[in-house]
Amino acid sequence: MSSSLCQPGKNLGCSACCGIFNLQDISRENCDRVLKYFTGNYVHGSCPDTGDGVAVPCTGNETVVRDFTSHICPFQGYLSSGKPGCLAHPLVHHGDEGRHLSLFGSKICGEFLCPAHSILDTHMRQMLIDCADDWYVYSVGIIDPLSFTWIVEECRSLHGQVRGGKRNPVAGALEIHAAYLNSRSIPVFHYGLSEYTAAAVDFSLASPKEHMDEERNVIKSFISGV
Ligand code: SF4
């Protein structure tokens, strides 16, 4: 929660750097289930119980996470309905800091900015906020800003403009992309810009690789029909 991209207002919020997209199953339903679990278990000022009933990395179950060297923070959850973020953040508790109990601590959490901050300029950030239907679609644009940019350019070339609002093509295309990301078991959220741009070759719509052609064609067809 360190910039306007993290909690942009509206009904949107992000906890991607808290590791929610490090789950092996990153479907909307599973991410929602885990966020609800963390929300229900959070007690300010104490470390949450992460051992039971939900897919978390500390179980050691290989099917649970995408990257075992990374983390899924149990301090993330819903700040309000459909708005993920850090449950331990001082802004949520009238200035009382709770992140010092987390793995990364308050300093690292407070100062971190994900690659989307480097890739999306002010105009593109606002476009993502305007087009995202909800937190899930928004977060997909955050974790894979090169695909979001590709989708926007495709909308411009097919429709001459990009519109937000209900049932807009950008949100629909991000939803389709999310399903493809879920079907690939590789890590899809990366903390560093160079790490992300190198890895995105394998899953981003902007990738030059041919294995992305099928998904590109599906999304082009979707955008042209909206
Ligand atoms: S992934 Fe990026 S936008 Fe989302 S909470 Fe972390 S720093 Fe903010």
Image: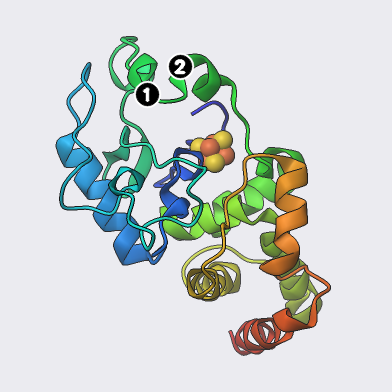
Q: Residue at x 37, y 42 (%)?
A: 84
Residue density around tag 1, few if under 14, some if 14–19, many if 20 or more, within 10 Å: some
Residue 164, how many percent across, how many down?
57, 63
Instruction: Name the residue nearer the viewer: 168 or 135.
Output: 135
- Res 79 visible: yes
**Label disc, if present, on residue 102 of the rendered structure:** 1
Q: Answer whether labels 2 and 1 touch (C-beta < 8 Å).
A: yes
Q: How far apart are labels 2 and 1 at the CA level?
A: 8 Å
Q: Position of residue 57 (x, y in %)?
A: 36, 47
Q: Any mark on residue 29, and which?
A: none
Of the residues shown, which amino acid type is indicated by label 1?
Answer: Ser
Above or below: residue 216 compared with residue 145: below
Nearest the viewer among 150 and 194 is 194
Q: Which mark is residue 106?
A: 2
Q: Quadrant of residue 188?
A: bottom right
Instruction: Give, as a three-letter code, the residue at label 2.
Output: Ser
Above or below, 64 relative to 77: below
